[in-house]
Image: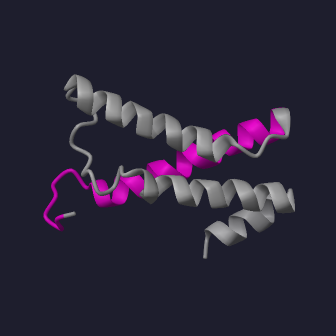
Amino acid sequence: VDWKDRRMWPTVVPILGVTFAAAAQAFFWENFKLPFGATFAVLGLLIGEWINRYCNFWGWTYFPISLVFPSALVVPALWLDIIMLLSGSYVITVGWWAR
C-alpha cells in the first residue's frame, strides 16, 4: 500500500474489519451462542469485494488487493471466534484483540 494513497484505505480497512467482525460476533453470540460471527462478516466482505472486482462495479474496486486478500482478514477473524468460543467472555476476547 502506498503511503500517498488519497483514499486512506490503510486506516479504513482495519477499522471496518474490526467493526463489522465485532458487530456480527456480538449478534451471533447474544442471539444464538454461535462463535462464527466474525468469520461470517469477513467472508461476506471478501465475497462482496471479489464479486465487485469481477463485475467491474465502481464502489469497492479501489481497495488495494493486498488489504482484501483472504489471509489478511480471515485469520484474525478465525482467532477472534476461537478466543470467544474457548473463553465465552467478551472481556477476554477484547483483551486479546487489543494487544
Quadrant hosting residue 66: bottom left
Q: Is residue 24 left or right of residue 54?
A: right
Q: Position of residue 58 (x, y in %)?
A: 20, 28
The residue sitting at 50% across, 34% down in the picture is: 44
Please tell me whether the stretch drawn in magenta is mainly helix, strand or loop: helix
Q: Is residue 96 left or right of residue 53?
A: right
The magenta region covers: 2-31
Name of the residue lying farthest toward the bottom: 99
Q: Nearer the viewer, residue 6 or 38?
A: 38
- Quadrant in which the C terminus is drawn: bottom right
The residue sitting at 26% across, 46% down in the picture is: 63
Quadrant hosting residue 85: bottom right
Q: Is residue 6 left or right of residue 20?
A: left
Asked if residue 15 is among those painted magenta in the image, a careful observer would answer: yes
- Quadrant in which the N terminus is drawn: bottom left
Count up the numbered dots.
0
Q: Position of residue 70 (x, y in %)?
A: 43, 51
Asked if residue 25 is among those painted magenta in the image, a careful observer would answer: yes
